[in-house]
Amino acid sequence: MNTVVQTIETAKDANKKAVQSSMLSPRFYTTDFAAIDRINIEPLRQEWDIMMREYEGDNNHDHFQRDAAFAEEFARTMPLLSKEMRQEFIDFLVSSLTSEYSGCILYNEIRKNITNPDLKQLMTYMARDESRHAGFINQSLRDFDLGIDLGNLKREKAYTFFKPKYILYATYLSEKIGYARYITIYRQLERHPEKRFHPIFRWFERWCNDEFRHGESFALIMRANPHLLRGPNLLWVRFFLLAVYATMFVRDHTRPMLHEAMGLDSASYDFEVFRITTQITKQVFPIALDTDNPKFRVGLEKLFEISKNIDLSKKQGGVAGKLKQAWHVSNAALVFGRLYLLPVKRQQLTTNVRMEPAW
Ligand SMILES: [Fe+2]
Ligand SMILES: [Fe+2]
């Protein structure tokens, strides 16, 4: 029987947790490679070539190595963490590793299955970066004897098929949100170094510049193919904005202590991430979610409550548990639908596609 991993005590639990699929866990994706192969970036050739030179320059090639102080910091801070806090942090590491590795696999699979030289080169660089990121997190999991077997994860985890345009919307957003998340944590701990409870956060600034650049690549692809950013496609943009924001909100609220330890609370952290992401998306999306609308916040809070009820009914099991679960899931769909129908804001696209990671 496929039991749901609640707490991570052993390497086996950690590996199971990474493989497990749920509404909230990061997924692995596959797509229509032939369609990706046909993507044309020629209208933005100049910007594209500049970006490729940045990837080639690889300014983070020496970044993902631990320094001498890492082990010392780890040894000093870890005994101070409560058992629950340690659990939340490990959960954060496993879910971050899974999403880094998800990018690595997707970009690598695309690279292997296409011949389009522009896209192939891009995918090679991005897979290189994501493999470093995943490897670096895995080292930190190994410090707890909770290393993830990446080969096994690649074989065992379920893959979700997404049409190329969905891959573009979703991956663009997850790269930019990844940037906004890491930079918000980094800036907070820069102001409050006493709250840095693990050395890995020192790496976040240069790390998130990689994510920012990955997002830039998808921005160029979409702007070079503007039909992706108008008409009925905007309904999909709206859907992915909401799906990505809502998943992040609910997932982060399951780890309140983690944010509290950094002097943040999950909700204000998430709304700061939404604010930054919305500013960045002016480079591609002519619409943005109105995250300041009080109904938006109330809806997200409802989704979090419902997700706790879903967990409880899963734990309960049996026919009654299954029925309750189905009820809560349909309730979640209803709340999601209402959030989807809230008015969106129009925004003017930036003249230049490229942006600086200036947050
Ligand atoms: Fe990454
Ligand atoms: Fe990335």
Image (spheres, rainbow, N blue to C red):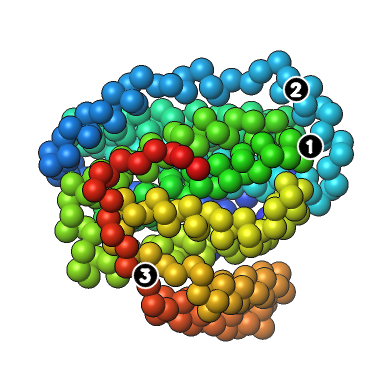
Q: Disc 2 marks which amino acid?
A: Ala
Q: Which residue is mark 2?
A: 71
Residue 318 place in picture, x, y as percent: 67, 77
The amino acid marked with disc number 1 is Glu
Counting residues from the start of the chain, the first of labels 3 and 2 encountered is 2
Q: Residue at x 36, y 70 (%)?
A: 345
Residue that mark 3 sits on: 345
Q: Residue at x 17, y 51 (%)?
A: 225
Point out the tag, 1 or 2, that comes first from the N-terminus: 2
Horizontal side of 14 relative to 63 (left or right) equals right
Helix, strand or loop at label 1? It is: helix
Q: Residues within 10 Å of mark 2 (few under 14, many from 20)?
A: few
Q: Image height check: is 297 above or below 38?
A: below
User: From mark 3 to mark 1, how far is it between C-alphas?
Assistant: 39 Å
Question: Viewer-proximal residue, 249 or 112?
Answer: 249
**Quadrant of the snapshot with the N terminus:** bottom right
The residue to which callout 1 is attached is 194
Vertical placement of residue 222 versus 44, above or below: below
Q: Are marks 1 and 2 in contact (CB under 8 Å)?
A: no
Q: Amino acid at mark 3?
A: Lys
